Image (cartoon, rainbow, N blue to C red):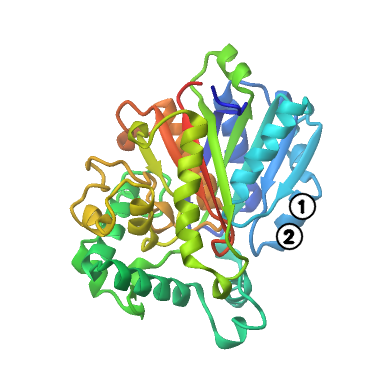
Amino acid sequence: MSQHNLAIIGVGEVPTANRPDRTHWDIIYDTCMEAVRDSGLHKDDIEGVISVAPQAQPEITAELSFGKLPEELGLKGCKDVIMCNAGGASTSNCLRLAEQYISSGIAKAVLVHHVTVHSTIPLEDQINFFAKAGVDLQWEYPYGTTYNLIMGLMANLFMHRVGHTPEEMASVVTALRSWASRDPNSFFYGKEVPSVQKVLSSSLINTPLHKRESNVLGDGGCAMVVVSAEMAKQMKRPAAYKLGESVRYFSGTCVMRDFNKVEEGFRVTAQEALAEAGITKDQVSLWNCYLAYPLVHPMFAELLGVAPQGQGGKYFLEGRMSFGGDIPWSTIGDAPGRGHTGSGVSAATYVETARQLMGRAGERQVKDCRYVYQNTAGGSGFNNIATIWGKEV
């Protein structure tokens, strides 16, 4: 039996889009109140509020970190409020904090939420933030290191070591967008799924990274209501139960990163999380991976044992991870399909994990979804947190 005591019982989300007319608080009100309604609880039953720290948005960050949300939403039962920042791993840590609130008796029900509005951040501020975030300011920043550059170097190394072709790497975008085109909350909902040829014909940004292999920034937000496993069972509502977790730290900056250590960390965290949940990888219904850039997905598939060594790219090219394939994978399309909402991509992935286990993912619903592997990574990939979620304890 799992040693964890956490269940997601309510979710709320708005579509990802560039909509500067939609304020941070518009998104917060809509997602948080939808999650509360969805949970079956009253808003005054919420006793804890935990915010994912918005990136490069100082005004809303200040308002949330100084406890404005419970007052704005009229959460009269709220006992405590806090914000957590660990980059893309923030949501995992928000859920850990929520689990601690619940286990210690501080709160029976906790609201976890995220908001990002990139479209109102001045372009210069966006450039300066992403140029410095997760980058060593002495040894990397002065030489113009960017995430697209870093990811291109990683892709070159991976392709050289494994022998993957540009077509195989580009097919990851096609696979992710095949899911995203069926997600009403995606930036690319209802839009054409680009072929491998179309991905490769887009502008080359940094060898071998093309324009369509990079992310589009968007505005978005989501929220979850979590309670103890016991309370979720008593309420007799569909829920997603946390069953296992493992984490490894790598390094704070990319230039100092040992990628053999990273690969081992990806592999061992999955193994430990599965063992704690008491299941095997063959029982996983959905591999819901948050990796920000498409190029990491074939490597991840191999390290998780989903694809044989050296065959990850082939699996994507054959359509096995696409919508309709035999291996459900990142069913919101990760950041390349959802649109990049900063740390919110990991939050949206958790919402999708909950929806799939609740049987409410619409056209993307994985048949007989019982167990989900979900991961998050912090900042520039300083760690990996692997979790297993189940339809029941």
Disc 2 and disc 1 in contact, CB within 8 angstroms: yes
Q: Is residue 119 found left or right of 211 in the rendered image?
A: right
Question: Can you give x and y, in whole percent of width and height, for residue 59 in the image?
Answer: 73, 60
Picture layout, residue 248 above or below residue 272: below
Q: CA distance from mark 2 to mark 1?
A: 6 Å
Location of residue 8 by image quarter: top right
Where 158 falls versus 177 (above or below)?
A: below
The image quadrant that residue 194 belongs to is: bottom left
Amino acid at circle 1: Glu
Residue 286 or 337: which is nearer the viewer?
Answer: 286
Residue 311 x, y percent position in the rendering: 24, 56
Q: Quadrant of the N terminus?
A: top right
- Mark 2 belongs to which amino acid? Glu
Q: Is residue 211 visible?
A: yes
Total marks drawn? 2
Please provide percent x and percent y for residue 80: 80, 36
Secondary structure type for disc 1: helix
- Judging by the rendered image, the residue that carries numbered circle 1 is 63
In the rendered view, does 61 fall on the left or right side of 389?
right
Residue designated by label 2: 59
